Image (cartoon, coloured by chain):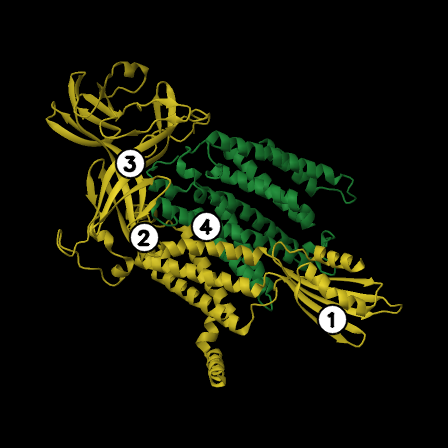
Amino acid sequence: MKKTLDDAKVREARLQRNPLYRNLSSMDFAVVLMSLVAVATLLVTFFPQGMDEAYYVTTFGKRLYGVYESLGLLGVLRSWWFMLLYLLLLAALVLCAHARSKEGVFRGPRGTMVYESEFSIPKGMDDILLIFPVLLRSIGFRGKRIATDEGRSEVTAVRGVSPAVSSFLFHAVAAVFLLALTVSYLFSWGGMLYVDEGKSSNLPSHARETRLMRLLGGREPAEPGGAGEDVIEVRLVDFARHYKEPLVPWRRGSRGGGDWPSDSGVFPLVAQTGGRQAVLTDWGSVLDVNWRGRSKRVSVQSSRGAASLGLCLSQGPFFEVTRVVLPALDETVNVALPAIVAVGDRRVELASSVIEGETDRHGLRRVSGVGTGRIRAAVSPAGVEKESGGAGRQAVAQLSSGEEASLGGVLVRIDYHSMRSLVRIRHDPGRPFLKLGALLVILFGMLKLYMYWYTLKVELRSRKGGATHLLLRMRASGFFSSPASVSRKIASLLAK
Amino acid sequence: MAASVAYGVSFLLLAFRRRRNTLRPGLRVRTLAFAVVVHACFMALRGVSAGRPPFMERVELLSWFALCCALMCLVGSRWFRSTFVTSAGVLAAFLTTAYLCLSFEYVRLPCLSVTKVFLVWWPGFSVPLAFAALVLAYAAQLRGLPGLGSLEKQRTRLPMSSAPDATAFLSLQLVRFAYPLLASGLLAFGIGCLQIASRGWFWQRSIAAQLFVLVACTIILHLSASRPASVTRIFMAYSAAFCGVVVSVLSFDLPQGLLRGLGLERLP
């Protein structure tokens, strides 16, 4: 047993003498690394990240774009030098926590003030020393020690959450969180796919490549339909949109700004039904996912993703797609609504029709399924504005899939009409640890910074007349610490 | 605008108080309290009309930041024991609301369900609150600089402690208050984006500046805990954090990347 302990002490001493360990575990080195990380985040602030090459060439010019790209300024958080900083910081965090736990320097509140107060009690020192420990225990102090000298005694005690424990826990979970970020960065893969209602779509095989594989040179693409291909098939079973009547109607603001433009984005946000306004609040898909011989039905919403078969699925934008046949042009056009098609000197406008459904006090019933929604087709002479006069020259019809109509001399037939949903699929082994790590970092951070910790030292001296003079010194840390009130409480309890 | 005017009046009352305090402190407090109540009412109305928590848009974030500055001054003025710090907070509230009045654009984000998700609106709540605390912390640091200490006689609740130590302690306490709020805001946003759009943090300018401020606060906490504590380095770290706060506040914006991921491409 003694030999094992001696070996451990020798190993520890050797570690402390190791210059690499000493430097990596020092606070100065950690502060320098954090300063460099701060400089890197400054670069993220001032250089737009992750945009297209065309955007950077337009903004900076081709030459500067090349320089910035080679220095990694346009993708700072993915650059090799930031990864190096990050790994060094992770190593410093682990070694710092290890060194301090071994040396026991996670102790005592630092960065604190010393609170001092003095008062006298008309009681003998022996009487006070009898009741003082009980009194301190009653208000939550522990670890009491009493040292007595001639005519003088000293009482020390502590109260609250030990900074040694809270600091170690916080740094440990911070290290776990950073490690989870690394695992997520290196080993996750994913992609997105468009899937029409009632149809299936497969995730491309190149989406299955992790960042680590790319760093190591990529992997061999599998033969389509071959034994090496591991297909993820997704079928869109149902798609739903949810609308709600706004409390305050949608309108234009007086300064020319206004509420969110109703045609912002790839789908309309505002719909009309029965003369009432409805604003899109949510949309979602019900999917059948098949992977590795297993099948599961999941529901994803724009506000909430889902996890199934080891995959994380999330809802992206949606499109209303239609195939329009124009016999006059002998053409078939595939468009996403809303769309405008030129036919000679005519303009064919295609848009989602009014939302069908009953309104109740909670909003509208959902719209779903192929064929239940209709398309509004309007034909007008080309160049006519959408004003009141122009609208009068429009020929309008509501068409469902398979229907046709002659509008202003133009025959329009809707061949196909469906909802198309964008679904993102991701496989991320680090995600559960990320969520847990984030929660624990916040909890232990609050514990370390908010919870109080008091270190109390009371010096007692006998005075003439049987009184005792007390000099109280208290160090406190934590946002919720209040040394003055604790001191007043001690004084009032002693006086009683 | 009413709140902005009230903040301005409150700041003038604080800044130009007479030495003998012939202007009763009650008037200053009442003016500030009136401004806070009016401001809070308008924020609540905005939330009700929008149908979601009012912590998403640029206007709402700036407004909440100003309200946090004023609220902290109102609630914590007895604890600060420094008119300089309180005046700085009220001045920040006034400047922010005045800027909003001058550059206000009526734009309302739709009440999408995603805007009601806790992980999406919590950053809009916690980060401006943390920034307000950091502004006051920097004011306390400035207050503790040699030279400024002679401007007024400071009273503290901590006997036998000098003015510079008291202001350094106040600054540190405010950083301790702000740090978990700032960290939780950043982490919540990242985890929320992962859950909703399967993509991590969208590093727009405001978010990147928040990360910079978080790192600066981490440096402050570590430097304050080390012995001997380097006052110059600590002050530089506070200055860096304050600059980061200014950049982030000026570039407060919608979570553009998240909304783009949902298909809301054309933003006003």
Per the image, the residue denoted by label 2 is A65
Mark drawn on residue A198: none
Q: Earlier in the sequence, mark 3 or mark 2?
A: 2
What SS does tag 3 mark?
Answer: strand
Q: Do the residues marked 2 and 1 share a common chain?
A: yes
Q: Quick check: can you spot residue A114?
A: no
Q: Position of residue A172 (x, y in %)?
A: 47, 63
Tell me whether circle 1 and circle 4 mark residues in contact (CB < 8 Å).
no
Question: Is residue B81 placed above or below A143 in the rendered structure?
Answer: above
Which residue is label 3 attached to? A318
Q: Using the image, name the chain to which the residue with label 1 belongs.
A: A
Q: Residue at x 39, y 26 (%)?
A: A363
Which residue does the numbered mark 1 point to in the structure image? A154
Instruction: Report the amino acid beneath label 1.
Output: Glu
**Spatial CA span between label 1 and label 4:** 47 Å
Between disc 3 and disc 2, the foreground one is 3
Give the letter of the yellow chain. Answer: A
| Closer to us: B97 or B33 | B33
Pointers 3 and 2 within a single chain: yes
Crowding at dot 3, Cα within 10 Å, few <14 / some 14-19 / many 20+, comes out as many
Amino acid at dot 3: Phe
Label 2: chain letter: A
Label 3, label 2: how many angstroms apart (C-alpha)? 34 Å
Q: Nearer the viewer, residue A42 or A171?
A: A171
The kind of secondary structure element at disc 1 is: strand
* Residue receiving disc 4: B186
Q: Are marks 3 and 2 in contact (CB under 8 Å)?
A: no
Q: Is residue A128 left or right of residue A451?
A: right
